[in-house]
Image: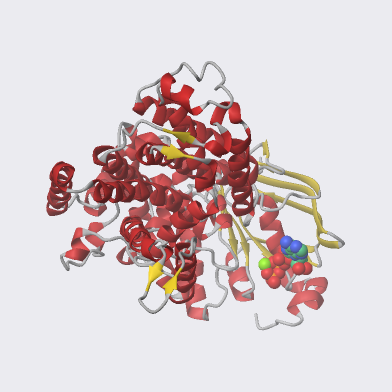
Amino acid sequence: MGRIALQPPGFYSTVAKAYRKQPNRWGLLLTGGVILSLVLFIYWAGGHFNPYQVRILNLIGINIGLGLSLNLINGFTGQFSLGHAGFMAVGAYTTTLLMMPPAIKQMNFFMMPLVSPLDQIQLPFLAALLLGGLLSALMGVLIGAPVLRLRGDYLAIATLGFSEIIRIVITNIRSVTNGALGLKGIPAYTNLWWSWGFALLTIFVMTRLIHSSYGRAFKAIREDEIAAEAMGIGLSRHKMLAFTLAAFLAGIGGGFQASLLTTIEPNMFRFTLTFEILLMVVLGGMGSITGTVIAATIVTILKEVLRGVEAPMNLGFISLPGIPGMRMVIFSLLLILVVLFYREGIMGQRELSWERLLGQKDSSPERGVEI
Amino acid sequence: MSLLELEGVGKKFGGLTALSDFNLSLAPGELVGLIGPNGAGKTTVFNLITGVYKPTEGRIVFNGKDITGLRPDLITRCGIARTFQNIRLFGSLSVLENVLVANHLRLRSNPLEAVIRWGRYGAEGREMVAYSQSLLEAVGLAHLAQEQASSLPYGQQRRLEIVRALATKPKLLLLDEPAAGMNPAEARELMDFIRQIRKDFDLTILLIEHHMRVVMGICERILVLDYGLTIAEGSPAEIQKNQKVVTAYLGVETGA
Ligand SMILES: Nc1ncnc2c1ncn2[C@@H]1O[C@H](COP(=O)(O)OP(=O)(O)OP(=O)(O)O)[C@@H](O)[C@H]1O
Ligand SMILES: [Mg+2]
């Protein structure tokens, strides 16, 4: 065995050069190419796709962002959160109330007037979105601070409870949210640029974060909390970081969705919404960014395709009434099947990379790690 | 001045007294052994020093600072690192990543800087990778840097756990049965390794070990625990002659 000694500083930078993951020129070029094609596609799709198809494309973009944010806390950090519907509701309502023109607010709140100064405020879309995300992140801090200190599955229970409470509160503070009547006529700002911009930005932030020292700390916590803590990683600080960022992104995603659907009401934010996003994360692979991107696309499309099973069917000899909730049954079965027989999901904890797609070996020691 | 001082430390789990009135003083640079039969309370001592358990009584002072009841990550930041009796690596991470995780406590960049790779993060990240890589090279694990930690053979996992602890740049290293499950040749090699890192990293080491030969060969001083009580303390020669120790412990395992 070699002698171990602290080396002079020059030695380290030489070693660092040798082992740092060299940015793959082809990879960068290909990534650039994909982004460019996406931009061209969006440009093209705006003129050639029908509104229904555009809506699905929008939903895919938003769902990629939402799925990734849930994967950050559940898959990468190993803390099981079930609160996404709640965070999305906070984001959706905040964004809507901040950007809706006063005239439309007045039409919505015909039973009980909207409290001032909300009834007069009208902010630009981006500002409203960011504030929605921030309020959602603040909620994340308030729930996370007490709960993330505890070990075990308390987070799942607490976030589930939070999500339901948010829905009940929204139903009941009618002078702010218009209660069960919901809000209609939300300005439809969400378009493919916004939704896919959100998706790409989330992919970028997640990739960089996960491959940074913070990302390794998250994964260390997932693997073994006691060992992570013994390596000097503050557990609550890092869990809070992941959880708050996830809540922020969920809030933004909620805001986008509100402006895409142009109508929101409390019942949209039931547990089934969290469940759909959870399905994307589990199906794609807990702890895989590319897996979530793939699964978000599949689940979003599947949800539209399966719309048929809820509609009344006429099979010629027999006509079946529509069964509302049938898609949920199918999704639940799908989740059970994945968990039973396909626990890794599509990608497990692996990632698709250009090297992998092009059939190059990507684990040679020279490739090292990203820093 | 001593580096680590435990004064009358005790730990009860409900009705069970795992450790009582435990006193220990480690001088800088010492290599001290902690032995005793199964369930004697050895690992409990480590868990108390590293903050995994809070002592029910007594005081722990490290480097002049009272660390009694401090959070484990903060204790590690003070300069105490450990390995675990049942190996606790980050299984799905690579060998290199395992060591990198132990560098995180020195990172000064905030998450935003880390995401946009801006300012000091670049330099800090490179330094981190280089330091971890040089550690792996020094202990002969560099060729496995990209392997998944859980795929390593047992002996190398033990060694990786020690390297990971070293990457936190500790002053005091606590090793919990590092030679467990090793054959005599591997154990001997490990002992050379421990001597080497003590010298090269200026470490003070507290070592729990079952292999008598290992402890006797390497430690300057040995403490013997039995049912949570310190029944003997002295040089290896003194311990081997001590009647209480022989009956409590060596009597069964005179293989040494
Ligand atoms: N978390 C705990 N809860 C309850 N009892 C515990 C706990 N940790 C340790 N003990 C008990 O404390 C006593 C001392 O345990 P400890 O692990 O310190 O022994 P040890 O000397 O390390 O033994 P071994 O050689 O088997 O590793 C044992 O009786 C054990 O069952
Ligand atoms: Mg033990």
User: Viewed as shown, does residue A34 lie left or right of B7?
Assistant: left
Residue in the picture at 66% in, 43% down: B2
Which image quadrant for residue A47? top left
Residue in the picture at 66% in, 83% down: B255
A303 above or below B114?
A: below
A315 above or below A266?
A: below
Quadrant including the N terminus of chain B:
top right
Q: Nearer the viewer, residue A37 or A304?
A: A304
Residue B224 appears in the picture as rendered: no
Quadrant of picture, ligand 1: bottom right
Q: Nearer the viewer, residue A179 or B17?
A: A179
Residue A113 appears at what percent x and percent y?
Answer: 56, 22
Residue A135 appears in the picture as rendered: yes
Q: Nearer the viewer, residue A356 or A198?
A: A198
Residue A371 appears at what percent x and percent y?
Answer: 31, 47
Quadrant including the C terminus of chain B:
bottom right
Residue A323 appears at what percent x and percent y?
Answer: 48, 65
